[in-house]
Amino acid sequence: MFNERHNIQTIHTKYVLDGKATIAFKKPSLNLLIKCDPIQLKGFLQTLKLGMEGKDVINLRLNTVTAMAQKSKLQTKMAINRHSDYPIKVFPRYLQSLTIDNTQSVKLSYHICSLRNLTHLDVSNNKLRKLPVELGRLHLSKLVLHDNNLGEMDDWSFLNGSKLRDSLRELDLSANDLTCLPLPVGLNVLEAHRLAFASDADGASTHSPEPLWLQAVA
């Protein structure tokens, strides 16, 4: 047990947004590394600060940490329509649906590729030129890439990711710099995901390269 009130030498919080902090104790002389959810970590550090100031924090600690954890868990959807809405570093870890629309983004944050619960990703109306291969690690059922700057010569290997291959059921590639499915990935994707060209706006079967909107077939 540590008597933290007068025994903490310093607290390093440089990487708190990444869910990391270090507490340096005087006696015994050692460093305690903390790695957890960023939101819960902030609540803990705030409570620790109050404790070091000698304030009664028992009820406050329980209420603060519980409320923060519930808020993080409950947020399963997020829509970003302007840069000011974009998280500086951390997305809610329990997101299932994420829409980033018309923010003029030129690249996709790698942190998005770590959202294990994400099943619906819509990044329409941006300026994306490539997508990280790590995107293939997600269990996405719907991926909307409409109206970006993606081309046939770009790296599409993320579509062959082991998890994405099993989960993807809808893929929208319309309004990009594409005249056909990118090869050699194209044929493999169709077979692996059991995707077929969807119907156009008038309900007719689409056999031409556009709109490059594909859905799973039975």
Image (tube, rainbow, N blue to C red):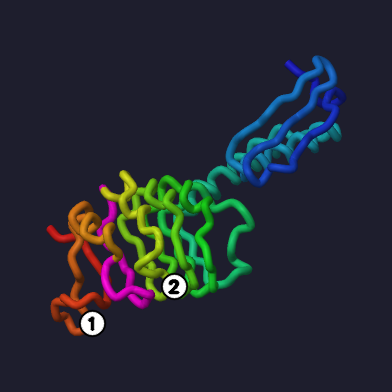
Image point (52%, 52%), residue name: 110
In three-dimensional space, the C-alpha distance between marks 1 and 2, rounded to whole angstroms, equals 23 Å
Image point (53%, 67%), residue name: 106
Q: Image height check: is 114 above or below 82?
A: above
Image point (45%, 54%), residue name: 132
Where is residue 183? Give x, y as percent.
Answer: 28, 62
- Please indicate whether residue 127 sits to the left or right of residue 196 in the image: right
The image quadrant that residue 62 belongs to is top right
Tell me the element at label 1: loop
Tell me the element at label 2: loop
Where is residue 144? Give x, y as percent.
Answer: 36, 66
Boundaries of the magenta span: 166-181
Q: Disc 1 vs disc 2: Cβ atoms closer than 8 Å? A: no
Of the numbered discs 1 and 2, the one sitting upstream in the chain is 2
Frontmost residue, 152 versus 199: 152
Where is residue 44? Give x, y as percent.
Answer: 69, 37
| In magenta segment, residue 199 | no
- Please indicate whether residue 45 sits to the left or right of residue 151 in the image: right
Frontmost residue, 25 versus 128: 128
Give amino acid for label 1.
Answer: Ala
Say which mark, if any, is on residue 149. Answer: 2
Which quadrant: the C terminus? bottom left
Q: Main secondary structure of the magenta part?
A: loop
Residue beneath label 1, please?
A: 201
| In magenta segment, residue 168 | yes
Give amino acid for label 2.
Answer: Asn
Number of numbered discs: 2
